[in-house]
């Protein structure tokens, strides 16, 4: 099974948009602008504004108007896309338009599309950033995971795929910025799509050992990879993660990636949850809840995607990437409700529900990260169903012990277009995870499940600035709500954390 990433290219050409030969020409029109079609109207003897008026097209964001050109211009078809109101146009609008273009191209079997970057005409726009967002929209929408289509699908004619987007830009300075933004988007989208592939690959293949193999494939280009087998994990006292892994036929594996550029002033540790399948263990999940649990390593997948991006972007901060890959299964050797396990930092955990396994494995992963003495720690985990109840399928939760760190992550999330919202690390709820026989227990009392899970993790990070991202909602797209987030693993966090690291 091959890992797919990008199928297409985006090129900038210093050419007039009406002179490009392409299957499809995409033009943008803002809402409420009096003569949005003047230029194209001139080529079509005023017919376009008539068609627009008849069909009720008024430039609302995402609206489209499609017509053939009958040879009047070089492109075969034209799509006019609504950009929404001028004053509310943001980089994320450009990202959505990029995704929409891919959708239109697919449904009209266009292999080449010519367009201009939406928003480049606006005053005070950051060209590079807008171009990057637009290109991310294109690259991320084009992703499909169809590695497993068998003979039935193979007999069908493969769809004509979008191969190339030509960005027409006459301005020299704008063209250079556009190229830089597109390059950046290409690196980040490839990394994101790689994370998506890892999440989408079934647990029968994406085992702890396979996750270690994936990490090893990233070694080189300034990235070092250290693998810990079960023996070494035991030697280091990672009894909590080992307990979770005990019910599975697959041995656990510890992974430590690192990147140390010369002159780095700060070190960040990024920790990912890496449960390759979460059956719930002896506290077995109902069948429905188990269907999607191959995604329970999405945090670690984003760590791997991030390192793929780091190798290209070379930020000036040192980075550790850490995950302990385990499978949570019920069996005669599985850990049990009532067991007490000791984590690497000495904290003892009473396990009351074996399905609250993420925090138990992260106890050791965070303890390990702490021994590296980083300046800050960020973890990503598909940790709680409660987070999906609180914030839904699009928004991840942020809980942090440091306001400066949470602010940086919030602004990185806004820039990358990955929705994030802060919840309080409300200390009083520590009452909920007090154990009568151990330091803490692994479940709360039923309310504020995302907060009590984060408070549990806090026991493993000392005073180091730390932030926890609960990505249970957005790590996986069940129902598509925007084109740049297609069905399956989303790669949530790759672009957010890359932006965060580039801020050092
Ligand atoms: N991996 C799940 C959380 C999850 C749920 C992720 C839905 C993505 C979608 C986690 O290990 C889990 O099972 N959490 C339990 C904790 C509970 C037993 C305290 C949950 O949220 O129900
Ligand atoms: Mn679980
Ligand atoms: Zn889990």
Image (tube, rainbow, N blue to C red):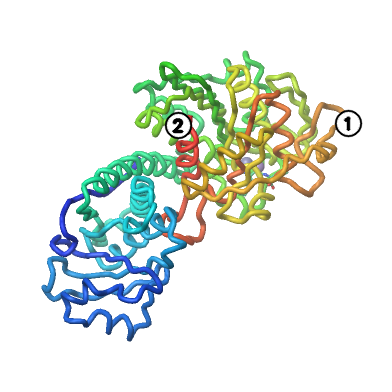
As drawn, is 187 to the left or to the right of 503? left
- Mark yes or no: residue 145 visible: no
Q: What x and y, as percent, mark residue 185?
A: 35, 44
Closer-to-camera residue (454/267):
267
As drawn, is 44 to the left or to the right of 183? left
Q: As displayed, is residue 139 above or below residue 305?
A: below
Outermost top residue: 235
Q: CA distance from mark 2 to mark 1?
A: 39 Å
Q: As displayed, is residue 494 above or below residue 94?
A: above
Reading the image, the residue beneath label 2 is 210
Closer-to-camera residue (325/104):
104
* Circle 2 or circle 1, nearest the eye: 1
Closer-to-camera residue (328/478):
478
Reading the image, the residue beneath label 1 is 436
Helix, strand, or loop for circle 2?
helix
Q: What x and y, as percent, mark residue 362?
A: 64, 31
Outermost right residue: 436
Residue 403: assigned label: none
**Does any atom of ligand 3 lie closer than 8 Å to the CB of label 2?**
no
As drawn, is 336 to the left or to the right of 330? right
As drawn, is 258 to the left or to the right of 69? right
């Amino acid at each position: 099974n091959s890992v797919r990433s990008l199928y297409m290219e985006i090129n900038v050409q210093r050419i007039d948009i009406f002179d490009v030969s392409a299957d499809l020409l995409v033009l943008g029109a803002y809402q409420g602008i009096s003569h949005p079609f003047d230029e194209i109207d001139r080529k079509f003897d005023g017919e376009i504004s008539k068609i627009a008026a008849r069909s009720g097209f008024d430039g609302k964001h995402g609206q489209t108007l499609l017509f053939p050109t009958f040879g009047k211009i070089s492109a075969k078809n034209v799509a006019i896309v609504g950009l929404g109101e001028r004053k509310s146009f943001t980089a994320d609008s450009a990202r959505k338009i990029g995704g929409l273009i891919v959708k239109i191209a697919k449904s009209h079997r266009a292999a080449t599309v010519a367009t201009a970057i939406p928003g480049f005409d606006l005053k005070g726009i950051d060209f590079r950033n807008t171009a990057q967002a637009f290109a991310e929209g294109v690259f991320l929408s084009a992703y499909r995971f169809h590695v497993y289509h068998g003979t039935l699908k193979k007999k069908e004619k493969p769809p004509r795929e979008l191969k190339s987007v030509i960005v027409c830009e006459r301005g020299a300075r704008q063209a250079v910025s556009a190229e830089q933004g597109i390059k950046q988007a290409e690196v980040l989208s490839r990394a994101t799509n790689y994370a998506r592939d890892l999440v989408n690959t079934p647990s029968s293949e994406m085992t702890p050992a396979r996750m270690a193999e994936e990490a090893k494939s990233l070694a080189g280009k300034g990235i070092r990879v250290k693998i810990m087998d079960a023996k070494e994990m035991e030697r280091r006292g990672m009894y909590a993660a080992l307990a979770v892994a005990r019910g599975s036929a697959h041995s656990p594996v510890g992974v430590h990636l690192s990147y140390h550029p010369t002159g780095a002033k700060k070190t960040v540790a990024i920790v990912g949850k890496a449960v390759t399948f979460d059956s719930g263990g002896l506290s077995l999940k109902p069948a429905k809840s188990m269907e999607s649990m191959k995604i329970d390593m999405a945090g670690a997948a984003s760590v791997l995607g991030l390192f793929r991006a780091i190798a290209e972007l070379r930020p000036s901060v040192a980075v550790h990437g850490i995950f302990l890959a385990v499978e949570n299964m019920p069996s005669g050797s599985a850990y049990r409700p009532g067991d007490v396990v000791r984590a690497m930092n000495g904290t003892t955990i009473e396990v009351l529900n074996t399905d609250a396994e993420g925090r138990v494995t992260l106890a050791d992963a965070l303890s390990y990260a702490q021994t590296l003495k980083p300046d800050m720690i960020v973890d990503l985990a598909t940790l709680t169903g409660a987070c999906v109840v609180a914030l839904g399928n699009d928004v991840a939760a942020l809980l942090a012990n440091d306001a400066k760190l949470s602010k940086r992550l919030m602004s990185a999330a806004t820039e990358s277009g990955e929705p994030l919202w802060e919840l309080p690390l409300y200390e009083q709820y520590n009452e909920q995870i007090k154990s009568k026989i151990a330091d803490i227990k692994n479940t709360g009392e039923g309310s504020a499940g995302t907060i009590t899970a984060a408070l549990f993790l806090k026991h493993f990070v000392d005073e180091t600035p730390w932030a926890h991202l609960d990505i249970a909602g957005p790590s996986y797209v069940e129902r598509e709500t925007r084109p740049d987030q297609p069905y399956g693993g989303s790669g949530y966090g790759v672009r957010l954390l890359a932006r965060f690291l580039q801020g050092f």
